[in-house]
Amino acid sequence: MSQPLDCDVVIVGAGIAGSLVAWKLGSQGVKVIVLESGPGNQSLAQRQSYVDNFKVSGLPYPLRPAALKNYDFFTNSTNYYQEQPPTRPAQGPIGAQINEIAEPFSDYNIISTDVTTKGDWFQSNYERQLGGATWHWLGTTLRLLPTDFALESTYNPSVPGGLTAYDWPISYNQIEPWYGLAEQTIGVSGPDEGEEYLGLTRSSAYPMPGIPQSYLDQQLIAAIQGETFYDGWTKQNYPLEVAPTPQARNSAPGYGGRPQCQGSSSCIPVCPIQAKYDATQHIQLAQQTGNVEFRVQCVAYQVVADTTNSNLPITGIKYKNWQTDANGNISSTEGIVTGKIYVLASHAVENSKLLLNSPCGTITVANQSDQVGRNLADHPVSLVYALTDNPVYGYRGPLSTSGVESLRDGGFRSYRGAFRMEIGNDAWSWPISDPYTTPMNLLGTPGNGIWGQALAEQVANTLTRQIRIGCLTEQLPNPNFRVQLSKTPDQLGILMPQLTYGIDTYGRRALAAAVAASVQIFKSMIKNPVVQWNYEEFSDANGSIVIDQGRTTDSGTPNIFIREGWAGAGHVMGTHRMGPDTDAGKKMSVTNRLQQAHDHPNLYLLGSGNWPSYATGNPTLTISALALWAADTIKNQLSP
């Protein structure tokens, strides 16, 4: 006699996708067990401890000694939960020949040919903790554009290297109602108007009014009023239109039980009052249904498939439950959990690692297409920052309240990636870790710095005039950028992922155009602009930022700074992409349009790993919309 199943649905991962599905199913009477690799004490006292840690050290989250290296988020690891390659190529053009190909914006190239041809380290991180990355996400909740779902059929990009764009197997009109439901579910504050030029349509209004644009936003808007950006690829002008950013934080008190945003400017790494949505809210709601069990500190390491059945159903998830003693010693016990349907919602990297570690006959689970782990992508970020003539008063409000969204789409996508321009209220926090770096540099060493009233005046004069723009750029799918299993086990004996990544030509061109647009905007805000190129990825022996003298030709005191190289956006995508439920589609994708694995009828994969193409919009709202859609599909499968 077969053993009774533990539940109806097993979910791996308690981030935003897993928690929304657990809550939605649990509220309909479905029995759910969620495996979460991180710890799970999410009391108010625990949140306060994170806030206190952040105030003291800037590092809110404690080390997670199990199942990873002895590093954690916001420490000195740029490669979280992954085996690092032994060497890095030169990331920016400094010391390398640039502009080998004469093309628009080549003067603003910030990526060396080594990165384009040989790859680079992957620079985005993720969190192992109940609630996942929503603990430290920015809160931006943009919808993807209608053309984002049809990149190949609309623009058919053609670039050196032979990479191909792919359409999603769903359209904007199909996902639109789920976008509205996601905005209502997590609580989004958004503008009443101003999105029409992006081609968006809405069947429901935002549940809360938009967060007010900051004083900094208003100064930038006034400076570029009526300006356009000339794109050399299409030889067309595109408007530089600043729009308020929809975001999952409360513009008014009470929605979802959250307080009104107080503008603490620490959204990353932690909102001190939980005005910003995080997934712990739906974890608590899921628990209140009485139908959902969360098993924390349980790292899933293998998906079990029944290879004696031609349908290859999944029959269980194996996991390791870890503990640490007072001395930091790690121990673990093994377990297996069974259900009718299985959902992997543990991040684009971890989903792939888990599947690749799960044998299924001569291949691995869900991988008849050989696409699991492939097409690893991010939104590579260009950072340009400036010192304006007049105060703009950063460090107030959420970290970003506006962006230039008008360059997210256009005919240029046939030649280069699009980009969205995030206007930062965090001044130079991202580029150089201010407001700490500038005061320390002014202090200098005893006898060499400035002190007292002179220091206070200089700090005030500098910090109030700081501004930055971070541009999130678009890549094409590249099957050679991928997640694989390394040969190095973590502290639980589970093989760590090895990531291969780089910036393709389509993305490099997007970064160059983004820098050009950012410099143009700052030149409109500064009477005598002087541009300096900084190379921050590799500082000199003293730890100082290297100035690229070969590219810094303006005379005078620099007030616009271009960071050579790129930053990670934390938007990890593409590793188990969705595709049509056809013979051809199954050969090029891992899941169908409903996020159901082609190879296994009772296995679903959630998250931005499903993205066939990447666009420029922050992925969390789309993840949420698709998670709610998947919950509906799963409920129907359980009770047809």
Image (spheres, rainbow, N blue to C red):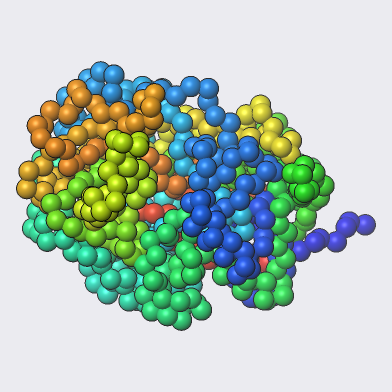
**Residue at (32% x, 23% y) in the render:** 113
Taking the image as shown, residue 354 lies to the left or right of residue 503, namely right
Taking the image as shown, residue 3 lies to the left or right of residue 72, namely right
Closest to the observer, 595 or 254: 254
**Residue at (16% x, 50% y) in the render:** 388
* Rendering quarter of residue 264: bottom left
Give the vertical position of 271 relative to 580 (above or below). Answer: below
**Residue at (53% x, 22% y) in the render:** 86
Say if residue 561 shows up in the picture. yes
| Quarter placement of the N terminus | bottom right
Closest to the observer, 193 or 554: 554
Residue 343 percent location from the top left of the image: 64, 55
| Quarter placement of the C terminus | bottom right
* Rendering quarter of residue 372: top right
Residue 471 percent location from the top left of the image: 29, 46
Say if residue 538 shows up in the picture. no
**Residue at (61% x, 54% y) in the render:** 129
Residue 504 percent location from the top left of the image: 35, 31
Closest to the observer, 629 or 84: 84
Closest to the observer, 288 or 11: 288
Taking the image as shown, residue 338 lies to the left or right of residue 166, namely right
Taking the image as shown, residue 73 lies to the left or right of residue 288, namely left
